[in-house]
Amino acid sequence: MTDRPAVDDVDTAVYTVPTDGPEADGTLAWDRTTLVLVTARSGTTTGLGYTYAPAATAHVVRELLAGTVTGLPALDVPRANERMCRAVRNAGLPGVAAQATAAVDIALWDLKARLLGLPLVALLGAARDDVPVYGSGGFTTYDAERQHRQLRGWAEDEGIPRVKIKIGESWGGQERRDLERVDRARASVGDAVELYVDANGGYTGGQAARVGGALADRGVTWFEEPVSSDHLTLLADLRGRLPMDVTAGEYGYTLPYFEHMLAGGAVDCLQADATRCCGITVWLRAAALAHARGIDISGHCAPHAHAHAAAAVPNLRHLEWFHDHVRIERLLFDGVLDPGGGSITPGADGAPGLGLSLVAERADPYRVQ
């Protein structure tokens, strides 16, 4: 094994980018987003990975993970992933440690593909050429004009035939305004565009059933986290009662979480986030679990971290083209993808790995560590 390329170094950087306006969903408000970048080096080749997480995530990488993977064969990413998951046992894997593991795992996959001179999708093996996306934003803080401009931009200017807005405002305390905003969204995009909503677990079970009936009348086809994803029995009950797809899974940090959700019959489409669930290694396994049960998977946020892996699974529904993350990825990286027509095509330009490169002169003003 000594003649095989090894992981020589793992490093971190942290960037915090203000939002372009006040943002909130049903249960949380924010005015900035932090990206934790990991670079993994073997010889003169460097791979990058990242997660959207607190700056403390970089400390976990430096203190618990970098030494764990340094010296391992750079081509053996599953081996490194297993070592990392074991290394954070006492620190607690779900949460920040899983996000740190995810960023390193993504960097290692990028590194491996770059060492082999392949786009990551070619290394994984493509199941499709094009990866559908849906426009995601529509924050509860938006006024009518801001929401209209955003939705029209996706549907009309970029030709994305699926869009999503946030509802469940104030922990379900603004049902009337939620439905008014859904009506305005439908008017903005017309009947030919699929309309999705995300309550971020803000409703009670009774509220979700009541609002879900009204959403069905408005042609909504995707109801994300109508109640907290901690309550699988409630999700499964709502799934059986509502005509649209009930979806969840973005807060899954480990593979057993997804198995519990699928075994409980809680979702019509599993949402998994590679930047949270210990990386591309585990995201692909989650996709396989879902596929075995005849369930689709959708990549949650961070579209450029997911794109190549998404193209490698047969049961992909789509990726979330999330406003904040798209904006940050366009700002920090060259090599970003074009969603025109409603899909992206990872690897089409032949660039190795994820196809991304950090642009220091654009990124440095936002660096905080």
Image: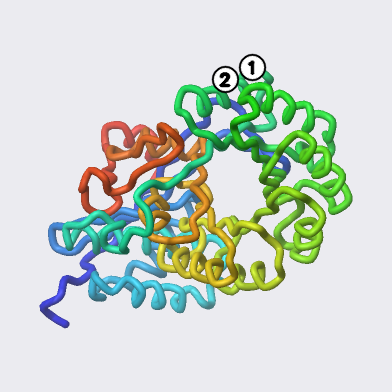
- Which residue is the site of mark 2? 149
- Which residue is the site of mark 1? 145
Which quadrant would residue 271 be assigned to in this image? bottom right
Residue 66, position as x, y percentages in the image: 34, 67
- In this view, 349 is above or below 85: above
Q: What element carries label 1?
A: helix
Residue 31, position as x, y percentages in the image: 58, 33
**Residue sitting farthest toward the top:** 145
Q: Is mark 2 on a helix, strand or loop?
A: helix
Q: How crowded is mark 1: few (under 14 residues within 10 Å), some or many (20 or more)?
A: few
Residue drawn 68% across and 40% down? 197
CB contact under 8 Å: marks 2 and 1 = yes
Q: Is residue 186 or residue 79 the one in the foreground?
A: 186
Residue 186 appears left or right of 157: right
Q: Given the image, on which type of amino acid does mark 2 rest?
A: Arg
Q: Is residue 191 or residue 268 the one in the foreground?
A: 191
Residue drawn 76% across and 49% down? 243
Structural distance between the alpha carbons of marks 2 and 1: 6 Å
